[in-house]
Every structure is written in C-alpha cells, then in structure tokens.
Amino acid sequence: MSDAPELSRREFARWIWRQLTSMRTALLLLLLLALVAIPGSVLPQTSVDARAVEAYWLDHPDLAPWLDRLGLFHTYTSVWFSAVYLLLMVSLVGCIVPRTITYAKAFRARPPKAPAIFSRMPASSVREVAVADVAAAVERARAALGRARVDVVEHGVIEEGGFTELSAESGHLREVGNLLFHLAIVGVLIGVAVGSLFGYRGAAVVTEGDGFSNVLTQYDDFASGALFDREALPPFALQVDAVDARFQLTGPQRGAPRMFAAHGRWSAGASANQEKRFDLRVNHPLKIGRTSVFLIGQGYAPVFKVTDAEGDVVFHDAVPFLPSDGTYTSSGVVKVPDAQPEGLGFQGFFLPTAVSTGKAEAPVSAFPAAANPLVGLFVFRGDLGLDSGRPQSVFMLDKARLEQVKTKDGAPFRVSLTPGQIADLPGGGSIQFVEVRQFARLQISSAPFAWLPLGATILGVAGLVLSLLIRPRRTWVRVSRTVIEVAALDRVPRGGRDLEEHVRRVQEAI
Amino acid sequence: MTSETFAQALVVAATVLLALAFVAHVAEWALGRGSDEEPPSAAMAAGIGRSVTVLAWLVLLAGVVTRGVAAGRVPWGNMYEFGCAAVVLMLAAYLILIRWWGSAIDWTGAAITGVSTVVLGASTLVYVPPGPLVPALHSYWLVLHVFAAMLAGAAFVLGAIASVGYLLKSRTPERFPRLPSATRLDEIAFKVNAFAFPIWTFAALIAGPIWAQYAWGRYWGWDPKEVWAFITWVVYAGYLHARATAGWKGRAAAILCLVGFTTFLFNFVGVNLFVGGLHSYAK
C-alpha cells in the first residue's frame, strides 16, 4: 500500500522530465526566452543606464514600483528570465544528449534493405533486358552511385532465377551536421555560464596625468562572476598621459565624434620598471595578459584650486564632470571637507564651448570640444558627511547637513569661471578654475573561455549548413537475368524531377 | 554636381524607376486576372516591369557606389545607406533567382518592386549627407557584420513574400492561378530562409559579439538591437526546426516565418528610430 504513492510520484517525475526534455518543449522555451527578453529592450535597464531608470521613476511614479517589483528594470538577471533560461538549459541538454546518440547511430547505420515492391517508392523504373553478367551490372550501379554507402545482398543462385539487391544511402554528413549543431548549442550555454562565473568587468575614470592600478578600490564600479576571486586581480598599473578627442568641425554632422584616443604607459606587476607605451582607441583595446582595457568614454575634468577663509590652499585637483549630452554639457561636484572653519561643497556644470544667447539666458554648450570652457557652480557650506562612514557618490553632494551660500538679496550665490579666473566666496576664501584636463573612462574586463561560446557558434553554423544543404537519398537496385529495377527515396523531399532524373541516370549507367 | 548630390540623384532616380516597375507589375496582374493562360498584354507588362527593374538596379548600384566613394568608406554606415544597399542586394537576389527558378519566383515582381520603393522612400526620410563615422564604427567588422545583416535581411524579405504567397494560395488556390503551387511556395520560402539563417547567425551571433567585444568591451550586453536580433534568430530557428524535423509544413510554418520577419523589421525600423541604445546609427 505504501508503495503506491511513492511509485506514482516517481512516475510523475519521469513524466515531467519527459515533457521538459521533449523537442517541442525545448522549442517552446526557446520562443518563450525570446518573448521574455522583449521588456528589457523597451524599458530602461539599470545595468545599461541607471540614470535612465531614475528618470523613468520620476516620469512614471505609479507604474515604476510595479515594474520594479516584477524585476523589469533588470530583466536579464530577474527571477523569471533566469527561470526560463535554466529550464531551457535543462530541456536542451535533456533533449540534445539523447538526440546526439540517435544522430551518432544514424551516422553509422547501414543502408536499409531493399523494399519488396519497388514501384511503391516515390521514383522507380523497371527495364526488362537480358543481363549476361549480373555482378558486373551491380558494380556499374555501385560506380554510378558515387560516394554513397552501399550494401549488396545476393538472393539465391542467379542462374536459377535468383537476383542481387543493392541498397545505398548517401548524405550521412547531414547527421554529422545535426550532431555538430546540437552539441554547439550545449557548448554555447556552457561557455556563457563559465565565462560569466569566472569573469569580471569594471570601469574607472582616469584623468590626464593620473594613474590607475588594478586593485578593487580604484574602480568606480565593478562586477564579477560568483566564482571570481576578487583578491586575485592581475597586478598591473597604467598612466594616462593624454586624451585625444576630435569632433566634426563643419557640415550637418558638426560636433559628431570622429576620433577618441588615450595615450599613456603601462607596466605589469612583476616588471614594474619596464614601462610600455599604449595608444588606446575605440575598437583597439589594450591586452594585458587575459585582461583587456577598453576606452569606452571620455570627458572633461576641470582643475580647481580652493583656498579657505584662513588663506590655506585646501584643495588642488582635477575633478571629472560627467557629460550628459552630445555637446558634453557636463555636471559634477567638488568636495572640500578640509576647508576651515566649515567644509565647502560645489555643485554645477561644465560647458566645453559656452555660448550665451542673451544676458538673461543661461549659457549652453555649442560644441563638444573645449573651445570656450566655462564652469558654473553653486556653493554649499557645512558638513559634507564624508566622515559618517556611509559610502557616497563622487558625483553627488549629500546636502543633508549643508547650507547653500546665498547673496545679500537671498538668491543662490553662483560662481561662473573661465580657465585662470578666481572667484572670492562670501564669508572668505576663493575658488580658482585653473585649467581644463580631459579624462578617459576605461573599462577593464576579463572574459575567460570566451573562445568556447564563439568557437561553438562557428561550429554550430558549419553543422547547420551541412544539415540544411545535405539531403540524404536512398537508392535500391535489383538485378536478375531478365530485369533491372531501380527505386529511390529522398528522406527530405526535394522539389522538381530530381529524383526521377536520378533513377533514370542509375538505370542508364547499368 | 558634387558626388554627394549625384549619389542622391541616382537613388531618387532608382526609386522612381522601381515605382514604375511596380506599376508595370500591377498592370501585369490586372491584365492577367481571371485567366489561367497569360494574355500577351500581361506578358508585355511583365517584361517591361522586369527590364525597368534591371535598369533601376543598375542605377541604384551606381548610386550606392558613388555614395561610398563620396564618404570614403563602405556605403552602409547609417540607416539611409543600409536601406539603399539592402535594396541593391534584395534586387540582385531576385534577379538571380528568376534565372534559377523562373516561374517559381517571377510572380514576386510586384511585391519586390513595391517593397523596394517603400524601403528607398522611407530611407530618404532619414537621409544624412555622406561623411565619416563615429569612432565605434571604425572597424573592419563594419564591412562583415553589416553586410551579412543586409544579405540575410534581403533574403528574409524574399522568404516572407513567398510565405504570404503560400498563405494566399493555400486558402483559395482558384483565386491565384498564376502563383506557383502551395507546395512549391512553401519550399521556396524554406530554401530562401535556410540560406538566410546561417548568414544571420554569422551577423548577429558571431561577427556582432566579436565586434562588440572590441568596441564596447563585452560580447553580449542585451542592447535593444541585440535583444531583437536574438529574437529574430530564435523565431527563424524555430521555423527551420519545425519545418525540417517536425514536418511542420504549411500554414503554421508560414506564419512563424512572417513572425520572424516582423521581428526583423521591428529591429530595423522600430529599434533604430524609437528605442535607441548603442546601435543608434540612424542619424
């Protein structure tokens, strides 16, 4: 009695497994994966553009929380996308492995025996003729069939009314193609999984004249696979000497980017004194061992010198401002926690080519190159919150305990500076816009085993072409003293009269 | 006349010629309606349509080549150029297939010239003067990746036309006496898509990721264009699989083929103009 539910549970599991690994389910899951990928192409994705997601929250305050609950802002790492992906993987492996065995068997199979009645085949021909040498006729048929796999069986004694049957099958490479294609899909799935488990990717902003060394703290953002050892980042360091950005100067595409490059030097851990030069351009990454360094963006880092109310220089550094549009209108903040008597914070924008349309109008950037640089900053005083221990973005001010500096009539105090200019601050101190530097945004990543999904895809295409191009054909020939019969069957029907032609050709060759 | 305006004039001329060829092919259908035998007037209209199409192809080819010379690079760096070059490939495929398959393909004249006129006309709406490209496109992969995508796209159009023909013919064969048999149409759609699919795989899943690794530092990043290229791949993979092994011929396969084509079309038009992302080279 107690066995019955146990058994049915096992049978149920087997039934589920059979359903899951059926070809139909695999195909449906593949289509489902395509379907669930759509939201990620329509809605902004945190991993692609976090700022676009924030903007979406502001524009759709009612809808956004629901979309967020469904994980639609990180579609490709969401629970349901992963679920479909994992189910597909299990289904494909469960479907493909048994199929590989079938394909392997089909590849080794001998041609099937000749049918009893040739005229039932899609194409056949009968010729009544006196055959002097049956064996020679069969050999001529074999020659006419080219590279097909051939079996010959003799029935009875020819002289006493017996006959010889020849069975041939061509196009076995189709099975090789099928095998290759299906194994390639498994290869791609494994390769992608392994690559994402052991890989890492991070980005860092490096200003001209500054360096970067490959340790976790130097990254602005960093993501790695579950099995990647974060302590094992390969040791190397690089120094960016110059960033070169060129833009279209004339014509309707004025301002369009034409060339980005970052020039500098790098050295690997052990040979720190052996510096090598690099010229990093888009499409031309720098390879350091298994790590690649990419130039994925650039922008401006104005250099500021801040003097506090006591006359000490408390800040002198380049500050990257993040570009937000095609003319490189950029925004950023300057944090001076060491200013006395109170910390100073600046928030504002940088315009590479500032143009003012009127006295009352705010200036805008007219061109992405730094032809007429201008910074505009609002000033804050107080506690910048850097000692609170909470992590802060370098591109945002925590204004919780800051007070905005105002003019006498109560309007926000604003400084507007061109390179070299100094502005005195109300309450003492000054800020100088020393010069403009450029920064390079670098991506440093390692994608191990990338050759596996790539190689598998290439093999898969090769297999696919074989399985689509090669069409297996079976041919049978029966020769006796008085009759030559030929029949043929295409396992994948071809159009036209190709099969009849083939039968006629074989018949004539005999 | 500068080479830029000359190229543009050639494209406009080709558009007009294709519109005329379309009119000729529509006349061919109108004149041949209701009769199983093609009347001489319909045959003449078909001949005119064919000749004008060949002429349009030559003019358009000259326009695309001139454009490439004017820009100093391969002429498929933005949406306008992609449209023009893809029509060159599509017409080439159509004219070659007429030689190979004859009556099995020549009925598509009206559809092919109509689609070509629309694609060229729509491309003119996103016209940009020839010029150098943004840094991300400075790569040899531009030649391979985009050419493969155009070639596959051209074949997808032919496959979709054959599938529409199949759906029409299989429902009311008596109304379309001049179409090839439904079986033959199904076969043509399969052949054309089976040709396109490996090329699409190369464009979207081999050349694309390799180039993305060089340009953006990752093989695959779920950019909207990548998502839709993947969707197209999956649907056509389903179509070929169903058609080849499951013996799923007929209407279901034809509809799957059209779904696949729609996703391709959306990727080309919708993602370029309305969705954005890293592949936004329309303008």
Image (tube, coloured by chain):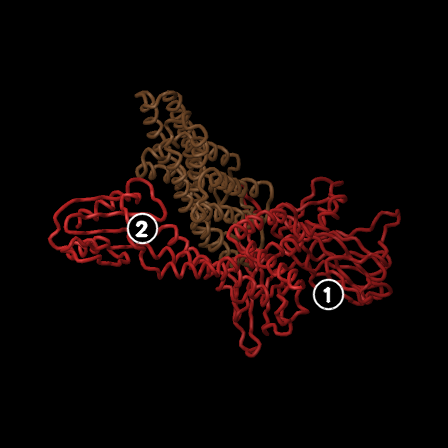
Chain colours: A red, B brown
> Amino acid under label 2?
Arg
Numbered disc 2: secondary structure: strand
Quadrant location, the C terminus of chain B: top right
Numbered disc in front, either 1 or 2: 2
Instruction: For mark 1, name the chain.
Output: A
Residue B136 position in % (x across, y down): 52, 53
| Identity of the residue drawn at 56% across and 44% down | A254
Residue B144 position in % (x across, y down): 43, 52
Residue A344 position in % (x across, y down): 81, 61
Q: Residue A133 or B258: which is nearer the viewer? A: A133
Q: Is residue A462 left or right of residue A136?
A: right
Instruction: For mark 2, name the chain.
Output: A
Q: Which residue is mark 2?
A: A473
Q: Is residue A150 left or right of residue A333?
A: left
Q: Residue A6 or B93: which is nearer the viewer? A: A6
Numbered disc 1: secondary structure: strand
Residue A220 position in % (x across, y down): 67, 63
In this view, B37 is above or below A377: above
* Dot 1 alpha-carbon crowd within 10 angstroms: few under 14, some 14 to 19, many 20 or more: some
* Dot 2 alpha-carbon crowd within 10 angstroms: few under 14, some 14 to 19, many 20 or more: some
| Identity of the residue drawn at 13% across and 51% down | A131
